[in-house]
Amino acid sequence: MYVTGQRMLIAGELVEATGGREYDNVNPATEEVIGTAPDAGPEDVERAVTAARAAFDEGRWATDVTFRQHCLRQLQEQLRKDVQEIRAAHTAETGMPVGLAMTIGVDGPIDNLSYYTDMIGEHAWQRELPPKEIMGRTARRVVRKEAAGVVSAITPWNYPFQLNLTKIAAPLAAGCTVVLKPAPDTPWSGTMLAAAAAETDLPPGVLNVLTTSDNAVAELMTTHRDVDQITFTGSTATGRRIMRNASDTIKRVSLELGGKSAAIVLDEALLELAVGMTAGGVCMHAGQGCALHTRLLVPFSLMDQAAQIAGAVMSQLKYGDPTDISNMMGPVVNRRQYEQVLGFLEVGRADGRLVTGGGPATQFDRGFWIQPTVFTDVPADSRLAREEIFGPVLVIVGFEDDDDAVRLANDSLYGLSGGVYSGDVDRAMAVANRLRTGTIAVNGAQWFDVESPFGGYKQSGLGREWGPEGLEDFLETKTVSFPV
């Protein structure tokens, strides 16, 4: 695969970057250049935001729910027509195994568009309060929900197509206009979305898609005077910077940031299930998921058993060529991430006991491949147990009792996800209710669904995606009163 001619979407037109600038797109499994993408500059940001502002101020998109439904359904149908091409490009630029792309990477997110398209037809866009005498006059009051305005949407490289669709679905359904900027490492997950959108009746400027290799260009989207809200998924460090940038003009900010989530095993009853699911999950997309349970907390008495089970799962995991549907794991996304993970593995050797893995996957001549890795006997205050690694690395930490497990799980800057396993569901629920985190799976039950709000406590972010809460994040509230 070598793809050129990708285009951005600005003001309803598929366009090159100003000056025809492009940059290379690299396959992380082979380190080969697989094509190019437009390399937007400041002029392109200005054009896109100006178009989004004009489309919002024109008014129809913000007020015509039926028209929004029509356009979003068109977008969904076009993406379904393009799905095989999108999957292939997605796997090539991310290294995500095609089997995962066929579920939560590409196909699932396309199906999820129906959720908000249907919801807005039934949403309570306004409610009327009973007449009431206020300061000597009887008034009626109407509380309205209205679109927040122009939204800058900035996405990362780990699940780029899924996150691109997530970032545009709720604001577009709410009546906002959007400027989307995918991560530099995964531009085609944006340009292919742009191409599909160009085939719909979306008015010019309602959705704009920019690709760029320059983070300084992307930063303009967080400071522009005509942007009303920023929605971002990525690192906590970048989230802090975005909050600072947004503060000058008091922009609304929605952030989905880092995680160091803990799976807690309370007793031996479900040890194999808990360890197997956690170890396998950590290897999904080479551990490049913010909500993965990368800390496994087990009673001290079960640590040896847990390490043995995790090591067996990791050592038997099938990984390799992402285009082979039988492979469960691919490479990490780029050399910087590869070197960062290897650095953490050095920390692990010093702070804990290596069970399996622990270095580069040397069977591959090229690419950014890391062995599935387990460390046990890791101190709770180690960097390995506290910092987000974003690689296929599981850390096993021991605890004394339920209170100690809760303390360790909550002793984190983050609060994004988590799990609790026990043969006693009431006991598991009691522990789950004490955890300061946004999503919790009890005994392996899955929560990853568009109907379930997703987001974090503490430095894992602000706001929620999915569910009714995901729509509400892009709505303003207005009260109108008038005399009876």
Image (spheres, helix red, strand yellow):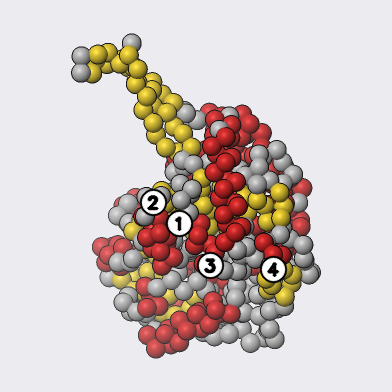
Please give the residue where the numbered disc 1 appears in the rendered image.
223
Which badge, 3 or 1, is on the more N-terminal residue?
3
Which badge, 4 or 2, is on the more N-terminal residue?
4
Q: CA distance from mark 4 to mark 1?
A: 24 Å
Q: Residue at x 42, y 85 (%)?
A: 347
Q: CA distance from mark 4 to mark 2?
A: 32 Å
Identify which residue, 68 or 111, lies in the foreground.
68
Q: CA distance from mark 3 to mark 4?
A: 15 Å
Q: Which quarter of the figure has residue 323?
A: bottom right
Which badge, 2 or 1, is on the more N-terminal residue?
1
- Above or below, 151 relative to 58: below
Badge 3: residue crowd in 10 Å (few <14, some 14–19, many ≥20) = few
- Identity of the amino acid at label 1? Thr
- Identity of the amino acid at label 2? Thr
Q: CA distance from mark 2 to mark 3?
A: 20 Å
Badge 2: residue crowd in 10 Å (few <14, some 14–19, many ≥20) = some
| Image position, residue 112 (x, y; %) | 60, 45
CB contact under 8 Å: marks 4 and 1: no
Q: CA distance from mark 3 to mark 1?
A: 13 Å
Q: Residue at x 46, y 51 (%)?
A: 225
Which badge, 3 or 4, is on the more N-terminal residue?
4
- Above or below, 102 relative to 300: above
- Identity of the amino acid at label 3? Asn
Residue 22, numbered circle = 4
Q: Which quarter of the figure has residue 307?
A: bottom left
Q: Judging from the image, what secondary structure is the residue with disc 3 in?
A: helix
Residue 322, numbered circle = none
2 vs 3, front mark: 2
Q: Judging from the image, what secondary structure is the residue with disc 4 in?
A: strand
Please give the residue where the numbered disc 3 appears in the rendered image.
215
Residue 249, numbered circle = 2
